[in-house]
Structures are given as structure tokens and as C-alpha cells.
Amino acid sequence: MNVMSIEKIVEQALQDGYLTPSMEAEVGRICDHASELSIEEYMALDRLMGALLTGEVVAVPRKQFINVMEELVLTEAIARVAEIEATSETTIDVGDIAAYALNRLPPLYATTEEGATYQRQRAKDELSELIGKQVGEAISRHLDRPQFFPERQALGKNTGNEVLIQVSSLLQACAPNFEQKSQ
């Protein structure tokens, strides 16, 4: 998406009837980086808020599906890494372990709670051994690897807001009907 002004984004959303995640992110980026918004920008945001409240514009959810394998691998990786870190001086990046294992396991996508429950059960019945094996291999490789690039920068570790954003996204994915009531 090209860099657009808040007014253009709102105009586009009103025209399409949808506010996409990238449009929402761009509005957020503009608001975060602007020392002060103009009257026109405030008016556009007010118009957008009104359109969202009346349903004239619908916010497209970031995720309409989940990969159940991600939660299964993370659970396994966290348990294994915690064991190792409790009994040694070693620090292991859970994200590295999960990414390695996920790249070697089949995805298990679901669009409903029932589908997610089915995929979890299927994984427990058919894939738990494979998940354990891949997480174990990921840890072994992680522990054996030389420190080639100590200056590498992990994804999303630039500012302090990532955890807040991740938790917010997780809550939106897990509890889409929960909405904080305004005072």
C-alpha cells in the first residue's frame, strides 16, 4: 500500500465499505509519528469512527483463521526450554525453536473454534510424537550453532510496543466479541 494521508485512507474506506488491516496500520503509523494532527485529519478520523459504529464501514479482521500447529509447537517449545534453562546457564530463544520446528511440520489451519478443537485432537492423536521430535531437533541445533551473527536483529524488537500489540492481537483473535466498554 502506498503511503496515504488519513483523509485518503478514510475516503477509500468509505468508498469500499471496508477498513483493511493495512489501512488501519497506516492510520496508526501516521498518528504515532505526527506531533499534531490537523483539523482535517481529526475530522476524517471522526467520520471513520462514525462509519465504523454505524456499520457503513466494516473493519476486516486481521486473522480470520489460525494455525493450531503454532500453539502446539509453542507449548512444547516453552516446556522444553524452561526445563533446560532451569537446570543450566543456557538461554534459548523460544521463537527460534518454534520457527525451526514449524518450518518442518504441517500447518493445521482452522476458521472456527470447533475446527480448532478438531485440529488439536488430530495433532494429539497423530502428530504429537513428530512435534516433540522437531522441537527437540530445533533445540539441539540451537545449542550446537556457532554465534556467526551476534549483531542479528530479531523481528519486532525495535520499540517497547510489540508485546502490547501482540497481546492485543492475541486477545482479538481469542476473544473477538470482547469489547471494552467506554466510560
Image (cartoon, helix red, strand yellow):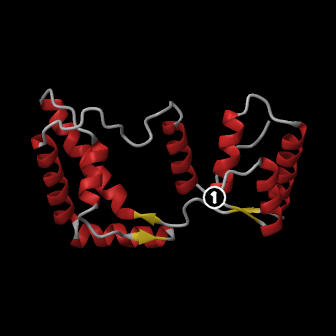
The residue lying at 78 percent from left, 68 percent from top is: 16
Question: Which x, y percent locates residue 151?
Answer: 29, 32
Q: Quadrant of the N terminus?
A: bottom right
Quarter-of-image position of residue 62? bottom right
Residue at (81%, 35%) from the top-left corner? 37
Identify the residue under disc 1.
1
Residue sitting nearer the eye, 37 or 56: 37
Extreme-front residue of the structure: 2
User: In the picture provided, is 39 more to the left or to the right than 154?
Assistant: right
Name the quadrant of the C terminus.
top right
Residue 44 image offset from top left, x and y in percent: 86, 48
Query: Residue drawn at (79%, 30%), measured in percent from left and top?
Result: 36
Q: Quadrant of residue 100 in the image?
A: bottom left
- Local secondary structure at mark 1: loop
Relative depth, front residue between 57 and 44:
44
> Within the image, what quadrant is residue 161 found in?
top right
Nearer-the-camera pick, 21 or 181 = 21
> Which x, y percent locates residue 169?
54, 49
Amino acid type assigned to the residue bearing label 1 in the image: Met
Q: Determine whether, in the image, residue 25 is placed left or right of residue 161.
A: right
Total number of numbered labels? Answer: 1
Crowdedness near tag 1: few (<14), some (14–19) or many (≥20) residues, C-alpha within 10 Å: few
Please indicate whether residue 99 sits to the left or right of residue 157 in the image.
left
